[in-house]
Image (spheres, coloured by chain):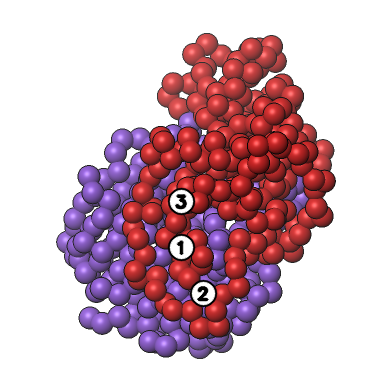
Amino acid sequence: MSNKISEANWTFHWRLTESAGIMIYLADFRGRRVLWEASLPYVTIDHQHETLDVGEDPGEVHGPWWVPLGTRTLEGPVRVQSFRGGVELSAAFAAGPYHYTQLWRFHDDGRISPWLTIYGPGVHDQHTYHPHWRFDFDLDGARDDSFERFEDNRWERVEREGWFPYSGEADEHGNVWRQVDVASGAAINIRPHSWDDAEVFAIRYHDGEWAPYSPRSAAGSATFPSAYVGDEPLDGDDVTLWYVAHVHFDQSFPYTAGPWIKVEGLGG
Amino acid sequence: MAPSKKPVKAAKPAKSKPKPRAAPKPEVPARAAKSAAAKPTPAKPAPDVARADATLFDPLTPGEVADALRTLMEDRRLSSMAKVGRYRVICTEPLVVKPPHWMAGHRLVRVVAYDYAADRTVDACVDLDAGVVAHLELSKGQPMLSRDEEALAVSIAMVDDRVRAKLAIGDTPQSTLHYWGRTTEDLAYARRSAAVVFGRPDGHASVVAVVDLLENLVTQVVPAERW
């Protein structure tokens, strides 16, 4: 199977990684570059204990754990399927009591759905999933980008790197964050799932930068991507975005996490 | 921001007579490490990411993997690790850098290894075109478990008496996860550890065993419902 797909106004490449699920790279919409690379570097899992007595609540006794979504946990082939108005890739992963289906859906109107369906029982009911997506958008070139978030009823430009949780405020289309190419005005709009309890880390891209092969940095240090957040300016540079969802397990699972992403201003 | 990586100087080819590695340098913030491989960029770089070569993202061939590992192990900065031989290669993947970086267009391999003797992670970029280690980071970060480590953790847990005492008939290892403790009271807080989840064939988890991979022993045995 070729790993280059040209369909529904999109041209993109994909490959299965060792630990970051299906990676998408060099994606163009209507012949213009949108994405350098995007992947799902990790899904961590926390456990809690359920008690009705606040005084006896032990909190989270154990730390998080994770298992790579990649070649070693893949169940069956990566599937490429057309659907009405687009094309999608999907792959199932399993690691004991944890099961996932990763999806990349490309719509002909410029939408991308990088999603993760989570199911499986876990080791017990009280646990929370934290899928981390990493997006390196290059709208009409790598640099000359800005990052904005919607707050106080308008789009506000963010000048420096940081952590930007969803506050509940969104524009009329539900978008909360966006990356804008200053020169062309083209934009990538990000709309979180209402129940993702989502947050975005905006980090300046550096030549030679690579995604970590683990969420864990040194003992006692912040995990990635928090450990990458400094105070560097974003405005007019190349920006990398991490979208992190926090999904508590409940009886209504399966649950599909992940944002809607919409390309705007590239024609059509 | 918390320090997490330690950059090492720019690449030098291996020499035939390796010298002992220099004493570690003080750690610097992750922020600085990220840009260690970069050369100063022009004030107004050409936005030519649209002309990137897609084949650079292709999976590595067995020969490319072997080439990358040989190049890394012959690098004098890792001579002590190679000599002691207590390391595991965690993964090898293609790495692609954007134009106008000087390595853009080169066939690059990222190699991640864990050095048990020094309790550290080796994260390297090998330039196959130039035959050099183009970038090297040594850190206390914890990469994911290798397949060998997953198998080792299972084998250690399977023969532990405390684990065996808690297993029911039909319980088998379901999965092995990379685990780290939340507090300093947990041995896994600062030590490389794996959690082996045992369970029934229907998927119901029964027991979790935490394995310390530095000492190769089980440090915790916890009923799954109390994890």
Residue, disc 3:
B129
Task: Residue at 28% x, 71% y: name it.
Answer: A29
Helix or strand or loop: what does disc 3 sit on? loop
Q: Amino acid at mark 2?
A: Asp
Q: Quadrant of the N terminus of chain A?
A: top left
Q: Position of residue A119 (x, y in %)?
A: 42, 42
Q: Nearer the viewer, mark 2 or mark 1?
A: 1
Q: Are marks 3 and 2 on the same chain?
A: no
Q: Are marks 2 and 1 on the same chain?
A: no
Residue, disc 1:
B104
Does residue A67 appear anywhere in the picture? no
Chain A's colour is purple
Q: Are marks 3 and 1 on the same chain?
A: yes
Q: Position of residue A32 (x, y in %)?
A: 30, 75
Helix or strand or loop: what does disc 1 sit on? loop
Q: Nearer the viewer, mark 3 or mark 2?
A: 3
Which label is found at residue A195?
A: none
Whole-angstrom CA distance, mark 3 to mark 1, is: 11 Å
Please determine whether, in this image, residue B84 is positioned above or below residue A46. above
CB-based contact (under 8 Å), mark 3 and mark 1: no
Chain letter corresponding to the colour red? B
Whole-angstrom CA distance, mark 3 to mark 2, is: 27 Å
Q: Which residue is at the front of the view, A155 or A16? A: A16
Q: Disc 2: which chain?
A: A
Residue, disc 2:
A238
Q: Residue A222 vs residue A172: left or right?
A: right
